[in-house]
Image (cartoon, rainbow, N blue to C red):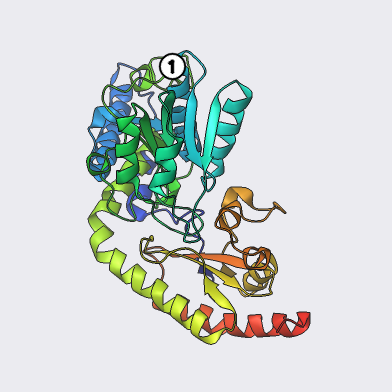
Amino acid sequence: MNAVYLDNCATTALDDEAFEAMLPFLRADYGNASSVHGFGQKARAAVEDSRSQVAELIGAEPSEIVFSSGGTEADNMALRGTVRSTGEPAHIVTSEIEHPAVLRCCEALETEGHRVTYLGVDRAGVIPSMALDAALTDQTCLVSIQHANNETGVIQPIGEMVQLAHERGALFHTDAVQTVGKIPVDVGSLGVDLLSLSGHKTHGPKGVGALYVRRGVELVPLLVGGSQERKRRAGTENVPAVAGLGAACRQAGARMEETTGRIRTLRDRLEQQIVGTIAGARINGGVDRRLPHVSNISFGGLDGEALLVALDFELIAVSTGAACASGSIAPSHVLTAMGLSPERVQGGLRFSLSRYTTESEIDRVLDVLPGLVRRMTESTGVR
């Protein structure tokens, strides 16, 4: 029985081209990209080629790309780097539904004397622009709002928010880890000053990511030491991973148009069948502006973790939320912030597809899931 993997918001399968791009730098071409000899210059060329590939995918200049160890570091670079550049206690605006990489960083900054405003969301999971407008002050140095939510896939009105932030003199950072490579992302059109992305969310390797830093934006480095990344991020570059990230970005751009519609069709069919055949199943989050590969569904009266385990026994992998929160007994902070009932929050599951998801895999989920829900409902006495 073949396994079905529908947890692509947590991580994705490595693209074949990304894998091939990494191989030379794991064995033969092992030079340090900062060395001036031939071995080093071959590694340097790979790093700069990848920088161009990442930049092209998001409409940036290569010089505006800073490589990192992943999305979490990129988020921390953006927040801490901006705050430190002010040289005084700062005001930051973010939201209640951000990824923990942003939320925990903001909480740490509060303990250091900075002030953070956390914006709420409506029941569709959207941050009202008027709420941001009311929260901004002349002391606000940074707004950090995710491009799309990692649990519901709901896309935020970033363009409107950027304009509001810039009118008050604040920089704007967006965590685009879930959107880059999945939908068109153009930093010029969005108007953002800083943007985070991660390799393993878009069929690249784990342990590598990047931060877009608009030309002219000053950041205090998070890591100090050598002069790598134009003195913005010290440390020897992870050349194999960087090469894999560049190849993954190239493939994502080349395949996006042809795969997005197919993925959305599979996702919509999965949703329609689940909601149409399983009593009490409800989609969480607005469906008008949403990533094409994400579906968050609550199963009334059931425990999402228990249903996840039951599906895992059937070799079907899904999630109850962010992978970094696995094992936590706390309910989803995203669904809770949306004002959903505790029962609906507890019964939530996230299904996330990729370009490798097949119709037969969706068929199998639809064959297995109704029976599992029925048996669990009967065993718990839920009606």
Q: In the image, 326: left or right of 89?
A: right
Residue 370, above or below 55: below
Give the residue pinned by disc 1: 86
Callout count: 1
Q: Residue at x 63, y 50 (%)?
A: 325
* Amino acid at circle 1: Thr
Residue 212, above or below 360: above
In this view of the protein, can residue 238 be seen by the observer?
Answer: no
**Which corner quadrant holds the C terminus?**
bottom right
**Foreground of the two, 93 or 272:** 93
SS assignment at label 1: helix
Residue 55 in the image, given as x and y percentages of width and height:
26, 38
- Which quadrant of the structure image shows residue 339? bottom right
Q: In the image, 3: left or right of 258?
A: right
Q: Residue at x 44, y 56 (%)?
A: 13
- Which quadrant of the structure image shows residue 54? top left
In this view of the protein, can residue 33 be seen by the observer?
Answer: yes
Residue 374 in the image, given as x and y percentages of width and height:
66, 85
Residue 123, above or below 83: below
**Foreground of the two, 136 or 234:** 136
Neighbours of disc 1 within 10 Å: few (<14), some (14-19), many (20+): few
Residue 257 in the image, given as x and y percentages of width and height:
24, 61
**Which corner quadrant holds the N terminus?**
bottom right
Q: In the image, 29: left or right of 135?
A: left
Q: Residue at x 49, y 26 (%)?
A: 91
Residue 265 in the image, given as x and y percentages of width and height:
34, 74
Q: In the image, 154: left or right of 345?
A: left
